Structure formats: structure tokens, C-alpha cells
Image (cartoon, grey):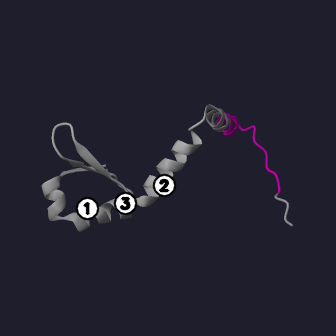
Amino acid sequence: MQITTVSDFRKDIKRYLDRVTNNFETLIINRGKKSGIVVMSLDEYNSLIATNHELSSRKNELRLDSAIDKLKSGTTFNKDLIEN
């Protein structure tokens, strides 16, 4: 994660944005004591939204937790896909 000021961001916007997109870094631009802006790549944003959607219902959350537990305990199995 990078942190900068509005002034520094303005001086070198291309370098900051390149680092965000190329290195999957999050950039925080401070705008005062209790104010700021977060800049992230579109891929990182889409991943965050997808994760939020997957965890949006308790049923999905439990299903994911169960799958993780099965992977950790080694109680998974392989299944061949049926091709049409």
C-alpha cells in the first residue's frame, strides 16, 4: 500500500497510477485529517466486488467455509467432467 498527498500525486500522477496497475498496489491519497481517497486497479476492484458478492449471504459464506474445511482436512475428491 502506498500513501501520498494530493500535491505529490498531482506532480507524478503517471508513476503512481503505473504502480497501482502494474504492481496491484493500493494507493491512499490523504486529503486532510479524516479524509482520503483510495485508488486501486480495476482488476483489484473487480476481485473485491466478487468476494463481497460471494460473502453477501450467510448460505454462501457457510458453503465456502465448508469447502475450505474440506480442502484443509484432505476430504476432497476428483471428478471427471462430462463432455457433450
Q: Residue under circle 2?
A: 46
The x and y percentages for residue 58 are 61, 31
Decide: few, some or many residues near mark 1? Use Cα within 10 Å; few <14, some 14-19, many ≥20: some
**Residue in view at x 75 percent, y 42 percent:** 76
Decide: few, some or many residues near mark 2? Use Cα within 10 Å; few <14, some 14-19, many ≥20: few
Q: CA distance from mark 1 to mark 2?
A: 20 Å
Q: In the image, which residues are magenta?
A: 66-80
Residue type at mark 1: give it. Answer: Tyr
Q: Is residue 26 left or right of residue 80?
A: left
Q: Look at the numbered discs 3 and 1 and tell me whether their residues touch, using CB distance below 8 Å.
A: no
Q: Is residue 29 left or right of residue 57?
A: left
Closer mark to the observer between disc 2 and disc 3: 2
Q: Which mark is residue 23?
A: 3
| Label 3: which secondary element | helix
Closer mark to the observer between disc 3 and disc 1: 1
The answer to which of marks 3 and 1 sits earlier in the sequence is 1
Q: Which mark is residue 16?
A: 1
The answer to which of marks 2 and 3 sits earlier in the sequence is 3
Q: CA distance from mark 3 to mark 1?
A: 10 Å
Residue 70 lies in magenta, yes or no? yes
Q: Decide: is 16 above or below 79.
A: below
Residue 23 lies in magenta, yes or no? no
The x and y percentages for residue 67 are 68, 39
Decide: few, some or many residues near mark 3? Use Cα within 10 Å; few <14, some 14-19, many ≥20: few
Residue type at mark 3: give it. Answer: Asn
Q: CA distance from mark 2 to mark 3?
A: 16 Å
